[in-house]
């Protein structure tokens, strides 16, 4: 078989052909002439260490179980300094494209080497090269239809679970910092999401400096809740111009002294280039009335059986002052300041559903993890530039389940061009070869 130039080969392609055995398997031999039989290619390792683990390889008459390391050239072993890394001591087979150097293990024994240079179809290499070099928004933009919608939906679910697991890493961190307090954990991550990216860090800092347990002591007094939130946020003016603001200042002064509180610096809050409805003052007013209305938010979330019930948790009007104010001491036409449907859905997608998923996994109660996925299927897909472009390429997008999967697909596979780990990329190479 004619071989493709070594310069065209990437390690990702070697992982792909090894995992799926997309190379000539006849009469496999090591570079020293020893026969090879691949009993199990092993499991792909995406962390530090050898590329595949738990592989079962028969070398001559002996069967070995261990790691497989892959390189374009055998000499890359030295270039990557694997000879100094104990993690590579149990490698049983070195799979390379070009065996340009004999490699030895730390104990001095030669490492068995399988060269694939004359075993991979040049047409496969050509198709891979074209996929990597295509100038399009995503590499498969011109080949989307090679994968059926049914297969794509199955891929969506796998990618979506990865996205939820990534989000739960942050939730787990908060959970540990709150000493495994579910209500406090929910309070903190909910506060962060009330910041809607621009003020997320400030909201999270506020939640840490103003624990839920402190607010719950005043759960029957909205004025005191607002005094604590606005005061701790550092947003109450030094020289109030109206009775409401003066009242908050006095109330906060008393509570600050009582609880020895330290407010945030007001400059942490961003107002510039924002719609007034998204001002942090309005988000704080909405957050305050939510705490006032529902003391045990986490328990209520667990009890919800539909997204309709979840939305009702956030269907609250702000207090009277904020109906005709966007900022302190500045009146505006009176207007409802309830959270909009799209804002509520973003909170469900970014807070409620990941937390529910994490709770189910942590407690080993699959009903909650499954419910999280069901809730995503009930919600409309987000409307943003990325999803619009996926729609234009005929990717099915009927719910937030789909849109969240596509956002993860773009980040994890399309942008870094990890096409060989993607169902669509795999189908493209299979169709062309």
Image (cartoon, rainbow, N blue to C red):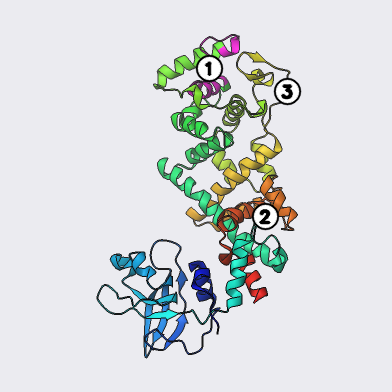
**Residue 290 as seen in the image, left or right of residue 18:** right
Pointer 2 residue: 402
Q: Nearer the viewer, residue 189 or 426?
A: 426
State the separation of the CA atoms marked 3 and 2: 34 Å
State the image coordinates of residue 302 (x, y, percent, origin top left).
58, 46
Q: Earlier in the sequence, mark 3 or mark 2?
A: 3
Image quadrant where one finds the C terminus: bottom right
**Residue 75 as seen in the image, left or right of residue 399:** left
Q: Nearer the viewer, residue 113 or 73?
A: 73
Q: Nearer the viewer, residue 309 or 328?
A: 328
User: Looking at the image, can residue 429 be seen?
Assistant: yes
Q: Write down the quadrant of residue 423 in the picture.
A: bottom right
Pointer 3 residue: 335
Is label 1 in contact with label 3 (beta carbons under 8 Å)? Answer: no
The image shows residue 136, relative to residue 32, as above or below, that is above
Q: Nearer the viewer, residue 389 or 8?
A: 8
């Amino acid at each position: 078989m004619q071989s493709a130039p070594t310069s065209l080969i990437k390690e990702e392609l070697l992982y792909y052909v090894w995992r799926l055995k997309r190379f000539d398997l006849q009469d496999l031999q090591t570079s020293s002439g020893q026969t090879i039989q691949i009993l199990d290619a092993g499991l792909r390792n995406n962390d530090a260490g050898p590329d595949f683990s738990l592989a079962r390889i028969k070398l001559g008459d002996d069967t070995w179980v261990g790691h497989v390391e892959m390189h374009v050239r055998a000499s890359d072993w030295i270039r990557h300094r694997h000879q100094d890394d104990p993690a590579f001591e149990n490698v049983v087979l070195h799979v390379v494209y070009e065996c340009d150097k004999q490699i030895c293990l730390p104990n001095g024994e030669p490492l068995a080497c399988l060269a694939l240079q004359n075993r991979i179809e040049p047409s496969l290499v050509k198709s891979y090269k074209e996929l990597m070099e295509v100038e399009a928004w995503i590499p498969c933009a011109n080949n989307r239809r090679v994968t059926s919608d049914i297969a794509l939906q199955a891929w969506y679910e796998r990618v979506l679970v990865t996205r939820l697991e990534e989000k739960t890493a942050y939730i787990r961190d908060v959970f540990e910092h709150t000493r495994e307090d579910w209500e406090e954990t929910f309070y903190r991550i909910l506060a962060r999401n009330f910041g809607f990216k621009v003020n997320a860090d400030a909201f999270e800092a506020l939640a840490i400096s103003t624990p839920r347990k402190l607010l719950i002591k005043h759960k029957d007094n909205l004025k005191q809740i607002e005094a604590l939130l606005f005061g701790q946020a550092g947003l109450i003016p030094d020289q109030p111009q109206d009775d409401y603001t003066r009242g908050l200042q006095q109330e906060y002064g008393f509570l600050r002294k009582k609880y020895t509180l330290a407010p945030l610096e007001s400059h942490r809050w961003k107002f510039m280039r924002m719609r007034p409805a998204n001002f942090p003052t309005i988000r704080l007013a909405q957050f305050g009335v939510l705490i006032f209305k529902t003391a045990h938010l986490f328990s209520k979330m667990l009890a919800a059986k539909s997204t309709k019930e979840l939305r009702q948790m956030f269907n609250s009007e702000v207090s009277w002052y904020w109906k005709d104010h966007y900022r302190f001491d500045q009146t505006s036409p009176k207007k409802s300041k309830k959270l909009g449907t799209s804002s509520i859905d973003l909170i469900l997608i970014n807070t409620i559903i990941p937390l529910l998923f994490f709770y189910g996994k942590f407690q080993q109660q699959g009903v909650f993890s499954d419910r999280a996925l069901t809730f995503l299927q009930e919600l409309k897909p987000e409307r943003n530039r990325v999803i619009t472009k996926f729609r234009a390429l005929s990717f099915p997008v009927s719910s937030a389940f789909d849109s969240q999967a596509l956002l993860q697909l773009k980040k994890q596979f399309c942008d870094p061009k990890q096409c060989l780990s993607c169902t669509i990329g795999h189908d493209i190479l299979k169709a062309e070869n």
